[in-house]
Amino acid sequence: MISQRSSPFLGRMLSLIEMPSISLRFLILDCPTDSTLPFYLEEFTKYNITHIVRCCQPTYSTAQFIERGIEVHDLPFKDGGVPPPNVVAEWLSIVDREERSSHEKEEIPTIAVHCVAGLGRAPALVAIALIELGMQPLDAVEFIRRKRRGAFNKPQIAYLDNYKRTLRTKSSSIKISFSRMFFRFGSKKEVNNSIPLSGCV
């Protein structure tokens, strides 16, 4: 399931990415600032955020998140680019650790990921996680774009299309037909928010 929530203030768009049978969620958002932290703190509580991953340079103090037990990770890489191997490795370590421990938690944990606009670097990391958890690369791109319109540029799509799993490659925990999943969650009345794969940010 994918849900999206926006505030009346420009730029505060949060996209919740959920997968059936997986006890882990992802929240893609734009970059918070010190002045907008109260809004994000409230939303993070609602979504049970356990980790925040920053793909851009820091723009806010992490003190209030750390006080609430939320871990903050800095994994910056080039705007509009693809994540280098060291960023991917650290990202997958966070995802794998949280996914494995999620079964012991009463409420499904959520990893928040942001860059500046939440349209390139952050969706790319989430797409990598979805691929690692069993989704086909271009299915992951479309799955995210359904509620994060404008996500990904051409180089990022090409990178994801050629991405090879490194976690649990021989025994993935998910065996799902995502074309059937799209059909089940979709509706004839639903507006298609996706855009052609040739779109750029």
Image (cartoon, helix red, strand yellow):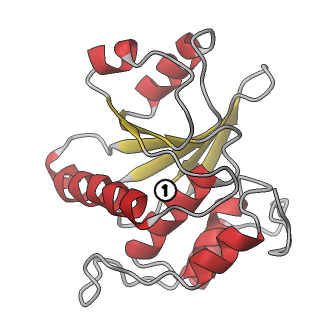
Q: Is residue 86 above or below residue 79?
A: below
Residue 98, image x, y percentages: 25, 51
Residue 4, image x, y percentages: 66, 43
Q: Residue at x 60, y 76 (%)?
A: 159
Q: Using the rendered view, name the quadrant where residue 51 is placed.
A: top left
Q: Using the rendered view, name the quadrant where residue 143 is placed.
A: bottom right
In the picture of the structure, the residue carrying the numbered disc 1 is 18
Q: Using the rendered view, name the quadrant where residue 22 is placed.
A: bottom left
Q: Nearer the viewer, residue 149 or 47?
A: 149
Considering the image in quadrants, where does the C terminus appear?
bottom right
Amino acid type at mark 1:
Glu
Residue 184 visible (yes or no): no
Q: Nearer the viewer, residue 100 or 31?
A: 31
Residue 115, image x, y percentages: 60, 41
Q: Residue at x 48, y 67 (%)?
A: 128
Q: Residue at x 19, y 59 (%)?
A: 100
Q: Is residue 59 above or below residue 47?
A: above
